[in-house]
Image (tube, coloured by chain):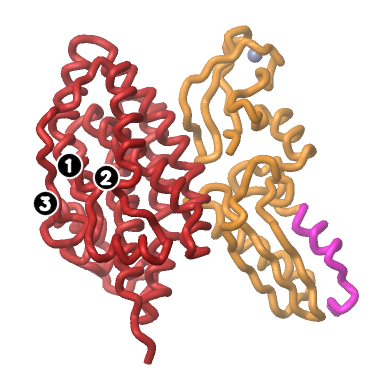
Chain colours: A orange, B red
Amino acid sequence: MNTTAVTVSQVWQWLGEIPDPEIPVISIVDLGVVRDVSVQENKVSVVITPTYSGCPAMREITEHITKELTSRGFEDVNLETRIAPAWTTDWMSATGKAKLESYGIAAPQAKGSPNRCPQCKSTDVEKISQFGSTPCKAQWRCTDCLEPFEYFKCI
Amino acid sequence: MSQVDSHLIEFLLRQGDNPLILGHRTSEWCGHAPALEEDIALANTALDLIGQTQLWLSYAAEVEGGGRSNNDLAFLRDVYDFRNVLMVEVPNEDFARTMVRQFLFDAFQVPWLTTLQASSDQRVSDIAIKSLKEALYHLERSSDTVIALGDGTELSNDRMQTALNYLWPYSGEFFGEDDTDKAMEKRDIAPLPVSIRETWNSTVSSTLDTANLIAPSDPFAHSGGRTGVRHTEHLGHLLATMQTLQRSHPGAQW
Ligand SMILES: [Zn+2]
């Protein structure tokens, strides 16, 4: 395929279909880890940033992007990992936050604790543990429906 | 050939080796913690620390310019090449010592990384900004745990006090000072560690007060880790485990 007519926004759209390896309900674009895209004929450059410095999903994300853009016809896929400016949950899209909640993960809040239970929407929630199944999440529990749930940590 | 910036390399190894060795020690808890939530928390803390290590040691390897990678620095150096403070290499012993150590370390890292954010070296500043977010979160958990267990039962208070008594003489090394520290200060890359001692003291004493724990008064401080002059016997054992793959299968790739 000839990639000369491919626009930057087209590449963003393709990347927006790549699921986050750890929370597949949101894409890597929703998560805010894709920071920049540039296209030059057959060459595409993508800048990504890790959520947490030790995020184990970075390698898989890199492989997914390379595979996706190669299959779209790019001969040269250049990936750069940048740690500055440091990733923040503010970069997570509103769509991403809504998808998280419907998946059962409470969205990050500036005050540092979840607004409500993603299941029954009760605001009576309590912390179980500051960490969860991945570096980006904590464990909480709803004191109304008693369901434990994960909360996406705000950083 | 340009001169190797040995003071900067030394400084970066110190920054990277602390989270590397503490991260490895913390990872030893994986599958053994007293509760599932704690197991997960310890493993995630270890993961953050190893992530920070990669950032520091990658930069150290680049400044060194000898073709070594961050992995080479972590897995192919021997005991006396390491520049971590002694506190992070002593055995975990129990959950009390593990959490008191994490707290004493976090109470140092938070003000330290905060000042490094303003480093004249852009790369140091970038790594500090990234790591600080994680360190703040670690400090929140470790200080909460120190308070919960210190101000808990007679048994938990006793275990925490024993841990504190053991670790206290290792805390002075955080504030060591030598030619490398002076060179970093002169170049505005990092302040002298002693400049954050008061902040550390005040975080530690207020948390220990709330936790009903008493800081030992003896000012004696072990040293030798951050300069590499004298590590404890424990580091060699730790490296034997951490580096076993590269020692048995040199050059093995993941
Ligand atoms: Zn609920």
**Residue B8 percent location from the top left of the image:** 35, 69
Nearer the N terminus, badge 3 or badge 2? 2
- Measured in 3D between alpha carbons, the distance from the residue under mark 1 to the one under mark 3, in whole angstroms, is 11 Å
Nearest to the observer: residue A3 or residue B94: B94
Density class for disc 1 (Cα within 10 Å; few <14, some 14-19, many ≥20) is many
| Disc 3 crowd, CA 10 A, few/some/many (<14, 14-19, 20+) | some
Residue furthest front in the image: B186
Question: Can see residue B123?
Answer: yes
Marks 1,3: beta carbons within 8 A: no
Q: Circle 3 is placed at which residue position?
A: B232
Question: Residues in magenta?
Answer: A1-16
| Quarter of the picture holding the N terminus of chain B | bottom left
Check the residue under mark 2 and report the chain it is in.
B
Q: Are marks 3 and 2 on the same chain?
A: yes
Cα distance, mark 2 to mark 1? Answer: 16 Å
Given residues B240 and A33, the one toward you in this image is A33
Can residue B254 be seen at all in this image of the molecule?
no
**Residue marked by disc 2:** B25
Q: Which residue is mark 1?
A: B170
Q: Identify which residue is drawn at 68% across, 46% down.
A: A31
* Residue A155 falls within the magenta-colored stretch: no
Vertical placement of B254 versus B149: above or below? below
The image quadrant of residue A102 is top right
Quadrant of image for the C terminus of chain B: bottom left
Q: Amino acid at mark 1?
A: Tyr
Q: Is residue B179 left or right of residue A129?
A: left
- Residue at x-position 50% and y-position 54%: B118
Which dot, 3 or 2, sits closer to the camera? 3
Quarter assignment of residue A78: bottom right
Dot 1 beta carbon under 8 Å from ligand 1: no
Q: Amino acid at mark 2?
A: Arg
